[in-house]
Image (tube, grey):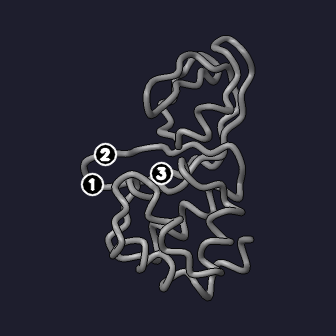
Amino acid sequence: MIGKLKGTLDEIDEDSCVIDVHGVGYVAHCSARTLASLPSPGEAVVLFIETYVREDMIRLYGFQTGLEREWFRLLMNNVQGVGAKVALAVLSTLAPADLANAIALRDIAMVSRAPGVGKKVAERIVTELRTKAPAYA
């Protein structure tokens, strides 16, 4: 599994970036928050990576911090109905500390601000991560 990429930023797309590591370009799908934090193409970059493997594809998800990656894992592995697209939308809208705070305060409205997250999904996120969130605050 790939856990971190360190190389040169090659390009930034709408929802991903390409990192050149010794001549190999890795596509990493990222939250808007991570994409906004990236340097200009041609500059050095480091991303924490979550490798997602299915029988028909391998996809890399890139994060600015290890904490953001942990929140992605929590959302993907513990909340029914939350896949990578929704998890990235939540992390694009809320920083990890804001997400932890919203869960602790049971602020469904704040969580549902993320694109593609309705009231029911926001309720599941708050309910299913309530006991896990303090460890990641």
Vertical position of residue 17 compared to residue 32: above or below: above
* Residue 9 image point, x, y percent: 63, 20
Label 3, label 1: how far apart the Cα atoms are: 22 Å
Q: Residue at x 57, y 16 (%)?
A: 10
Asked whether disc 2 touches disc 1, contact meaning CB atoms under 8 Å apart, the reply is: no
Name which quarter of the figure residue 116 lies in. bottom left
* Residue 81 image point, x, y percent: 32, 71
Res. 88 mark: 3
- State which tag comes first along the sequence, 3 or 2: 2
- Disc number lying in front (3 or 2): 3
Whether residue 53 sits left or right of residue 3 in the image: it is left
Vertical position of residue 5 compared to residue 7: above or below: below
Whether residue 32 sits left or right of residue 53 in the image: it is right
Amino acid type shown at disc 3? Leu
Name which quarter of the figure residue 132 lies in. bottom right
Element on which disc 2 rests: strand
In the rendered view of the protein, which quadrant contains the C terminus?
A: bottom right
Label 2, label 1: how far apart the Cα atoms are: 6 Å
Res. 55 mark: 1
For label 2, count other residues whose C-alpha is less than 10 Å away and answer few (under 14), some (14-19) or many (20+).
Answer: few
* Residue 119 image point, x, y percent: 36, 72
Label 3, label 2: how far apart the Cα atoms are: 18 Å
Amino acid type shown at disc 1? Glu
- Looking at the picture, tell me which residue is in the foreground, 21 or 116: 116
Q: Residue at x 43, y 28 (%)?
A: 14
Residue that carries the numbered disc 2 in the rendered image: 57
Element on which disc 3 rests: helix
Q: Return the residue found at the far bottom.
A: 131
Asked whether disc 3 touches disc 1, contact meaning CB atoms under 8 Å apart, the reply is: no
Vertical position of residue 127 compared to residue 30: above or below: below
Amino acid type shown at disc 2? Met
